[in-house]
Amino acid sequence: MATRILVVEDDADAATVVRAYLEREGYDVTVAHDGVSGLEAALDEPPDLVVLDWMLPGMDGLSFLRALRRAKALPVIMLTARSEENDRVAGLEAGADDYVVKPYSPRELVARVGAVLRRMSGAPAGEDAVVTLADVRIDGGRRRVEVAGEPVVLSALEFDLLITLAATPGRVFSRGELIDRVWGPDFAGVDRVVDVHVSNLRQKLAAAGAADVVGTVRGVGYRAEAP
């Protein structure tokens, strides 16, 4: 079955171009032209990935992303003309997996889609075993996290960060190492992306009762705290 991509873009010409390039790569593409119908499509028949414009009628991209994240852990690439770091961070904090600034090359977008889907295809290399840290159980093969037996819903990036850290408890990973392992060496974003996703990961673990699993080593990076 072909990988399914949902493109949420109000500019009909841009949506047509994106769709054509993605379909050329063999993806099954659905297009929505506003945030409300796009969110309905994402929730009714969840795709494998969402390409999401920031500025949308009815519901902007950030509101769409926050609503989606409350229900699903689908990977999302945001398209936006906003290039300031604060705007990129706002999108990442809302749960975006990647961020493409307009104007962009359709080939670049297709490459980003492929990179995100490859990250989604499984846990980081060699990390498919079950890892336990205190009450946290991480099943790399099933991509499932439980705290005290209760499931915790993480995004693909949050899961990959957690299992990368948890595979070697106590080892400190720099932001650069985490980007190479989780995002891949061709990632063109900023180091701040790691801080944003670690913060989101911590919030979810804390809400489940596991507040102290991921530690910060000031000026260096992050580590999983050994039980």
Image (cartoon, rainbow, N blue to C red):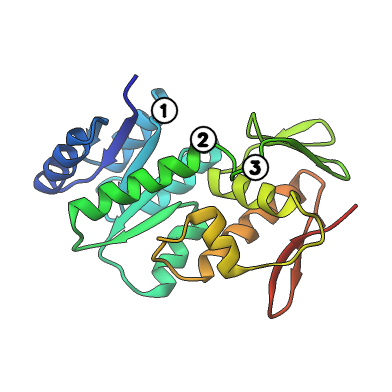
The span from disc 2 to disc 3 (Cα, nearest Å) is 26 Å
Going by the numbered disc 2, the residue's amino acid type is: Lys
| Tag in front: 2 or 3 | 3
Disc 2 secondary structure class: loop
Question: Residue 112 location in percent, x, y?
Answer: 34, 51
* Relative height, residue 59 to residue 199 (above, below): above
Outermost residue on the front side: it is: 126
Judge whether residue 1 can be spotted in this image: yes
Asked if residue 203 lies left or right of residue 112, the reply is: right
Three-letter code for the amino acid on which mark 3 is drawn: Gly
Q: Which residue is identified by label 3?
A: 126
Is residue 100 depicted above or below 77 in this figure?
A: below
Answer left or right for 80 relative to 43: left
**Which residue in the rendered view is the most extreme toward the top?**
1
- Which residue does the numbered mark 2 point to in the structure image? 72
The three-letter amino acid code for the residue at tag 1 is: Pro
x%, y% of residue 226? 87, 55
Residue 46: mark in rendering = 1
Q: Earlier in the sequence, mark 2 or mark 3?
A: 2
Identity of the residue drawn at 63% across and 38% down: 153
